[in-house]
Image (spheres, grey):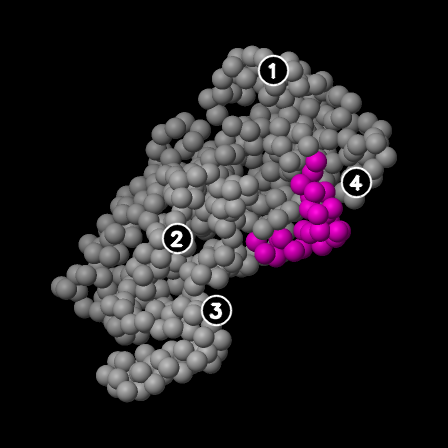
Amino acid sequence: MALKLYNTKNRVLEDFVPLDPSGKMVTMYNCGPTVYNYAHIGNLRAYVFADVLRRTLEASGYAVKQVINITDVGHLVSDADEGEDKMEVARKREGKSAEEIIATYSNAFYEDLAALNIEAAAERGNEAHFPRATHHIEEQKELVEVIAKKGYAYTTSDGIYFDTAKFPRYAEFARLDIAGLQGGARVGLGEKKNITDFALWKFSPKDGQKREQEWDNPLGVSGRGFPGWHIECSAMSRKYLGQPFDIHTGGIDHIPVHHTNEIAQSEAAYDLPLARYWMHSAHMTVNGEKMSKSLGNTYRLFDLIAKDISPLAFRYWLLTANYRTTVNFTWEALEATRSRLLRLHSKIGSWGAKAGRTIKVYEDRFYQYINDDLNTPRVVSLLDELVDDTQISGEDKRATALKFDQVLGLKLHEVPMPEILYISLPDEVKALLAHREQARKAKNFADSDRLRDEIKKLGYEVKDTPGGQEISRM
């Protein structure tokens, strides 16, 4: 079955056909984090989605060149080119240098990717896969020069802007109502010609305060400044993937501003599409409300681990919904998913270590579902169906489940005891749990009870469930 993907550009499902004439290589760009703070779980959904997409492409026989940018300059507090640079905000907040801020939050992001078993994490620090905006200033300045020579740029007292009125297709991608946006927009418009115009380059403030991150201005403009938020993605994706490339992804919030602006500046500069397929993951709410720092509901992966919820249980929960569907985070939902993952690991552990052959009818259905715009909910349900199928041997179930896991990415092959999978337990507790599992299987209940008491003395409580041992901090 051909791989079908929902292309935001055309708002329809389309057969995926790579640009590579050999049909073997796929190029993919994923909008990365602004490393001024920790990523929250809503941010991380976009990278789990992109990882499932990459794994699906690889399962279809493609090699994937994946690039995730690191925004370390130029993203202002307001996406509308207003306010202070987020990196400057973080620097002042923590009393550290920009490089210290970048290192802290980049490393935290890489650790989150690794904990979620996202394949790209293996390339951490590799500039060709995780390019930093500050390491590509010259490429961004060159792109500003090209845009200006084509007549799409103008200069104000605070920066160099893209004139969206000169790019007739500007509203098409996001289906923007330009007339509605312009209505009443004169207030606060400043020197911008149009409400949708955006900064290609910002000039450093002339109030005497020197920015730590600033460079000589392009276009021969005196003084110093820094790139706008959008220009980095156009410059770095072109450098590492070419233009056009195959797939561009991000969160749904990128559609009306960031991705619309990327398209405008890249296509205006080079008269070529930026990407052929645009894909976006939907929002995450928390208890039905928008995720917001003011509401105190922006959880990090660390917060989940502190409640004995593994990053892979969180990944599994995300897979139970379509990536284009808004998901509502609740602790109850995550607890239920954790139990579901426990049961799955217990079942796979009971089938032994030897894998048999994959069951074709299940494999065919797997490809049918995953190739239907990454329909992970149906794949997850199919996995449950496989687990409960009494007509298939354990060895064949194991082989088939591990086939599914090449895309699901739940590390089903690694951990015989699911409890140890997702809790950062002391080695002593892990050893006691392993011994207790052996005692349970041998029906040595006296030893099992004794080991439970030993674990309790170390501050952990063990419960026996149909899915195996569950452990939590007391």
Q: Earlier along the polypeptide chain: callout 2 or callout 3?
A: 2
Residue 424's disc is: 3
| Kind of element beneath mark 4 | loop
Viewer can see residue 385: yes
- Mark 2, residue position: 331
Describe the element under mark 3 as helix, strand or loop.
Answer: loop
Q: Which residue is mark 4?
A: 211
| Helix, strand or loop under label 1 | loop
Q: Is residue 231 above or below residue 154?
A: below
Cα–Cα gap, marks 2 and 3: 19 Å
Q: Which residue is mark 1?
A: 185
Q: Residues within 10 Å of mark 1 (few under 14, many from 20)?
A: some
Which one is earlier in the sequence, the residue at label 2 or at label 1? Answer: 1
| Local crowd size for mark 4, using a 10 Å CA cut-off: few (<14), some (14–19), many (≥20) | some
Q: Nearer the viewer, residue 343 or 397?
A: 343
Label 3 close to label 4 by CB (< 8 Å): no
Residue 135: image x %, image y %?
A: 70, 46
